[in-house]
Image (tube, helix red, strand yellow):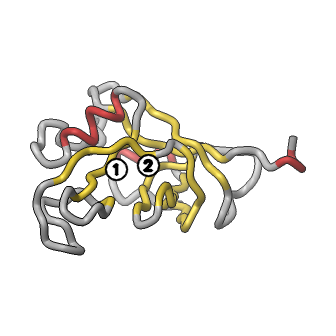
C-alpha cells in the first residue's frame, strides 16, 4: 500500500507573503500598493518594480476579474494532483497590472479568454485557504 502524498502548500508564515495568505483566510484578496508611486504590485515584492521604493501598504482588491489566460493540466506534475486531472489553472486580471493565478472550478462549459470570474476561497485540510475562480454565467446561459 502506497502512502498518500501531501500537496505542496504555501508558507503562510513568510513575512513577505503572510498578509496575502491571512487575507485569503478572511475571504479577501489583497496586494501591495507602493507608498511612493502608488503602483499596485503583484507578485509580492520587497521593492517596487516601477520606482524601486520599498514601503508598501496592503490593499483589498476586487473579488471579480476576467480570464486573461488559462491552461488545462491533463498530466499531474506533482503526484498529489494525479487524481484531480484534468484541471484548469486561470490567470485572472483583477485590477490593472495584477493578474492572479488560481484553479478554475469546474463549470458547465469550457472557459474562454475574457470570461468574467469571481473568487472562491477554498479551505485545505492542512490550514491555508487557497484562491480559486468560478465563471459567472453569461446572460444568454441563464
Percent position of residue 27, x then y: 42, 30
Q: Is residue 86 visible?
A: no
Left or right, 22 with respect to 104, comes to left
For the residue pair 35 and 9, the one nearer the viewer reads as 35
Give the crowd class for mark 1: few <14, some 14-19, many >=20 residues within 10 Å. Answer: few
In this image, 94 relative to 34: left or right? right
Residue 120 image offset from top left, x and y in percent: 51, 36
Q: Secondary structure at mark 2?
A: helix
User: Residue at horizontal 42%, vertical 56%?
Assistant: 100
Q: Which residue is mark 2?
A: 82
x and y, in percent, of residue 113 in the image: 65, 67
Mark 2: few/some/many CA within 10 Å (<14, 14-19, 20+) = few
The percent position of residue 93, horizontal first and vertical second, equals 51, 60
Q: Which residue is mark 1?
A: 79
Q: Residue at x 23, y 43 (%)?
A: 10
Asked if residue 18 lies left or right of residue 142, the reply is left
Residue 64 in sight: yes
Q: From the image, which quarter does the C terminus lie in?
A: top right
How many tags in the picture? 2
**In-front residue for pair 4/47:** 47
Residue under the image location 26 percent in, 52 percent down = 32
Marker disc for residue 55: none
Question: Which quadrant does the N terminus fall into?
Answer: top left
Q: Are marks 2 and 1 in contact (CB under 8 Å)?
A: yes
Instruction: Give the camera-side residue of 35 and 17.
Output: 35
Amino acid at each position: 500500500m502506497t502512502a498518500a502524498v501531501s500537496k505542496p502548500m504555501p508558507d503562510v508564515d513568510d513575512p513577505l507573503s503572510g498578509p496575502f495568505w491571512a487575507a485569503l483566510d478572511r475571504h479577501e484578496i489583497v496586494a501591495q500598493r507602493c507608498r511612493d508611486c502608488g503602483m499596485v504590485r503583484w507578485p509580492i515584492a520587497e521593492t517596487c518594480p516601477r520606482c524601486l521604493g520599498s514601503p508598501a501598504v496592503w490593499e483589498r482588491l476586487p473579488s471579480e476579474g476576467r480570464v486573461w489566460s488559462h491552461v488545462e493540466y491533463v498530466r499531474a506534475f506533482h503526484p498529489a494532483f494525479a487524481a484531480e486531472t484534468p484541471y484548469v489553472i486561470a490567470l485572472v486580471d483583477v485590477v490593472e497590472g495584477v493578474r492572479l493565478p488560481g484553479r478554475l472550478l469546474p463549470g458547465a462549459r469550457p472557459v474562454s479568454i475574457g470570461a468574467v470570474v469571481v473568487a472562491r476561497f477554498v479551505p485545505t485540510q492542512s490550514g491555508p485557504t487557497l484562491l480559486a475562480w468560478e465563471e459567472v454565467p453569461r446572460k444568454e446561459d441563464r
